[in-house]
């Protein structure tokens, strides 16, 4: 199993959520986050004063999928979240050693 974390633009929340449900992803955790990438912020003016903004609002999706579905889910995420502009986000993929469903005690793929 793999844990996939996708950091995307806030306006992609609903399209990506719907795309993941259509791809039959069993569940997801979604968080409102902020961060910065290679651009390291930009300058705006607030009441005539220059202000450096370096934290951009983003949405973080966390899902756990079987190993064989990783490439397909990457395609779903990129298709739903891509605008072609800087700041579209990233996908991080890491192994999951074990999953336990608290309610039933099920383990492994059955718990996902």
Image (cartoon, rainbow, N blue to C red):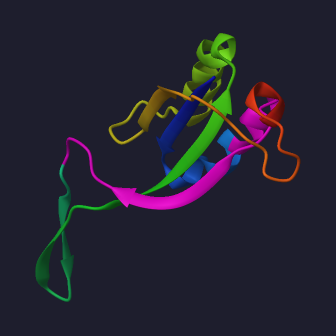
Asked whether, in this view, residue 89 is left or right of residue 24, the answer is left
* Magenta stretch in the rendered image: 17-39
For the view shown, which residue lies furthest in the front direction?
105
- 51 w.r.t. 20: above or below: below
- The answer to which of 68 and 40 lies nearer the viewer is 68
- 64 w.r.t. 11: above or below: above
Position of residue 20 measured from the top left corner of the image (x, y, whole percent): 73, 34
- Answer yes or no: is residue 23 visible: no
Point out the image quarter for the N terminus: top right
Is residue 34 within the magenta segment?
Answer: yes
User: Which of the 4 image quadrants contains residue 107?
Assistant: top right
Point out the image quarter for the C terminus: top right
Residue drawn at (61%, 18%) of the image: 70
Position of residue 33 measured from the top left corner of the image (x, y, whole percent): 45, 60
- The answer to which of 42 and 33 lies nearer the viewer is 33
Position of residue 100 measured from the top left corner of the image (x, y, whole percent): 73, 41
Residue drawn at (19%, 59%) of the image: 42
């Amino acid at each position: 199993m793999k844990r996939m974390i996708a950091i995307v633009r806030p306006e992609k929340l609903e399209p990506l959520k719907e795309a993941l449900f259509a791809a039959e992803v069993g569940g997801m955790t979604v968080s409102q986050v902020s961060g910065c990438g290679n651009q390291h912020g930009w300058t705006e003016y607030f009441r005539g004063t220059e202000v450096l903004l370096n934290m951009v609002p983003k949405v973080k999706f966390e899902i756990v999928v079987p190993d064989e579905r990783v490439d397909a889910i990457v395609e779903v995420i990129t298709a739903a979240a891509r605008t072609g502009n800087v700041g579209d986000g990233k996908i991080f993929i890491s192994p999951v050693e074990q999953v336990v469903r608290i309610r039933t005690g099920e383990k492994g793929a059955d718990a996902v």
